[in-house]
Amino acid sequence: MSDHPTPQEVAEKAAEAMLAADAATRGLGISVDAIGPGHAKLSMTVRDDMLNGHKTCHGGFLFALADSAFAFGCNAYNKVTVAQGCEIDYLRPGRLNDRLTAECREQALEGRSGVYDVRITNQDGATVALFRGKSRRIKGVIVPGLTPDAEE
């Protein structure tokens, strides 16, 4: 990495640091498959211990996958960003052994506030859930010294 990292390099370093500190995401077996400024793609396999009484993936695990994708997407600028609100719509069940992918895309970023959409799909490309997160930047950075203007 050069003295002036590219936005992609910043996103990669921030994601690496976030994943190392994120026991919940790691504990669910979630992997970071792609990262970029305002974008993240994470995936997980539905395990037996993630099934509810209907033998489908518990909605809380779907929410956790989407929320993690949202967190990685909005923190990819190396500025500490938290959720200020979010909602999810469940469209179809996740099943045992499904490989679910949550792709986060930034829709708007103005000042310290952002809006991000996450689509969860299964291995067949069918949409399982849609999530919208609203973010708020607070003080601090993910990786100190990575971006000189990120200390605000």
Image: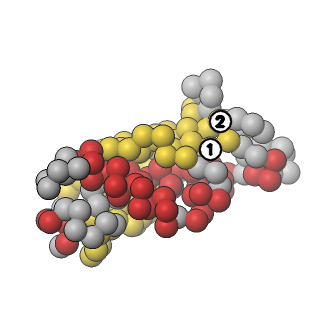
Left or right of residue 18, residue 11 in this image: left
In the image, 110 versus 149, the foreground residue is 149
x, y percentage for residue 64?
A: 58, 56
Tell me the SS state at disc 2: strand
Image point (48%, 40%), residue name = 33
x, y percentage for residue 142?
A: 34, 66
Left or right of residue 10, residue 122 in this image: right
Q: Please report whichever mark, 1 or 2, sits nearer to the chain's N-terminal start.
A: 1
Tell me the SS state at disc 1: strand
Quarter holding the C terminus? bottom left
Q: Report the disc number at residue 16.
A: none
Left or right of residue 13, residue 69 in this image: right
Q: Is residue 87 visible?
A: no
Q: Amino acid at mark 1?
A: Met
Image point (19%, 72%), residue name = 151
Image point (57%, 34%), residue name = 121
Q: Residue furthest bottom?
A: 139
In the image, 108 versus 18, the foreground residue is 18
Image point (62%, 28%), residue name = 123
Q: Report the disc number at residue 44.
A: 1
Q: Residue furthest top?
A: 124
Q: Report the disc number at residue 99.
A: 2
Q: In terms of image quadrants, where is residue 17? A: bottom left
Q: Residue furthest front?
A: 2
Q: Amino acid at mark 2?
A: Arg
Note whether 122 is above or below 51 in the view shown. above
